[in-house]
Amino acid sequence: MSSPTTVGREKTSEITPSQKFEGHTDEVLGAIHLPGGQRMMTCSRDSSLRVWNLKSGKQIGDDWRDGEREVYTIALSPDGTKVASGSEDGRMRLWDIDTGKVIPKWTGHTEGVWSVCWSRDGQRVLSGSNDGTAKQWDIESGKTILAPIKTGDELVQAVIYSPDMTMFATGAVDRGELAHETQYDKSPIKIWDTKTGELVAALKGHTNGVVCLAWTPDGERLVSGSYDYSIRTWDTTTWKQIAVLEGHTRFVHGIAISPNGRILASASWDKTARLWNLDNNQPISSPLHHASNVFSVSFSADGKLLATGCCDNNAFTWDVSTIVTEAGLDELLLDQRDNF
């Protein structure tokens, strides 16, 4: 799990992954856990989705493919039977978990789809695209619900439903926003009414674009990761900023919240993933080092295993349970209700 290394006179403990998943021939942009706790799935710029055995690290079956365009994002349906994917070709695809085949293919976006999110009831999927729009799709009909949301932003790279499905949030970046801007006066996060498509709030605070979002399970906080290297938390009643989590030294490209709502994971182009204590917004451990930029993070259903997708063409898993326990914070593995 951890190997001691000496830095000067101090002893530190370098955290090592539980497993490495090798096989993709290009950057791994997404990694998610599958039902049952035995498998995970990845998507890549090599145009494939792949399923892996968590214990052995070996690929299960053949690659999942439909065309030769990069697959940017994947999300598992609430019932665990389907995966939604977004690709470079602007198309949305639904995949059958059992067969590995595309069920329907939806066309509507005119540029790549960078983010997809299921509604909690599994009846719709939300998508965000580099065409500047967000769309809600009805699973049964395959048609869009309401008109496309024209966000006013150039690249919509993050979308997420609120837990109660009354709202959804979009995170965006403009072309060329790859460095800090001294006069940044934009609202890269926007909140929308799910039923009407009307704008509810526009959040200012970040000093560059936002490319990842996560909602706490209780719906009380929205968390954002940005090209300004920071993570910020927002009160979803007042839409005021609560905290700024600093530590990454490059773009924050992925975030995920543990199922109990107490641990945040972040992925960055500084070649690390980090774990944060959402009770006090402090780091839990030293960074989880990778050989290249880290694109994505996701928790297992029990919150005890983290998956990361990396630009070195590999995916990894990390033992959250051990990391948190070694930090003396094992109470973070419990549900809040267990403390009363």
Image: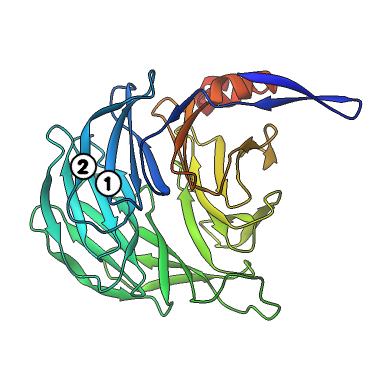
Say whether residue 119 is visible. Answer: no
Say whether residue 271 is visible. Answer: yes
Q: Viewed as shown, does residue 158 lie left or right of 327?
A: left
Task: Identify the amino acid type marked 1.
Answer: Ser
Residue shown at the point (34%, 22%) measured from the top left: 37
Task: Kindly check if marks 2 and 1 are in contact, taking CB atoms under 8 A apart as contact.
Answer: yes
- Numbered disc 2: secondary structure: strand
The residue that label 1 is drawn on is 48
The disc at residue 64 is 2
Q: Quadrant of the N terminus?
A: top right
Residue shown at the point (49%, 60%) measured from the top left: 211
Q: Residue furthest front?
A: 25
Residue shown at the point (27%, 46%) measured from the top left: 48
Q: Viewed as shown, does residue 259 lie left or right of 1?
A: left
Residue situated in front as seen by the camera: 194 or 327: 327
- Numbered disc 1: secondary structure: strand
Colouring used for the render:
rainbow
Q: Quadrant of the C terminus?
A: top right
Task: Identify the amino acid type marked 2.
Answer: Trp
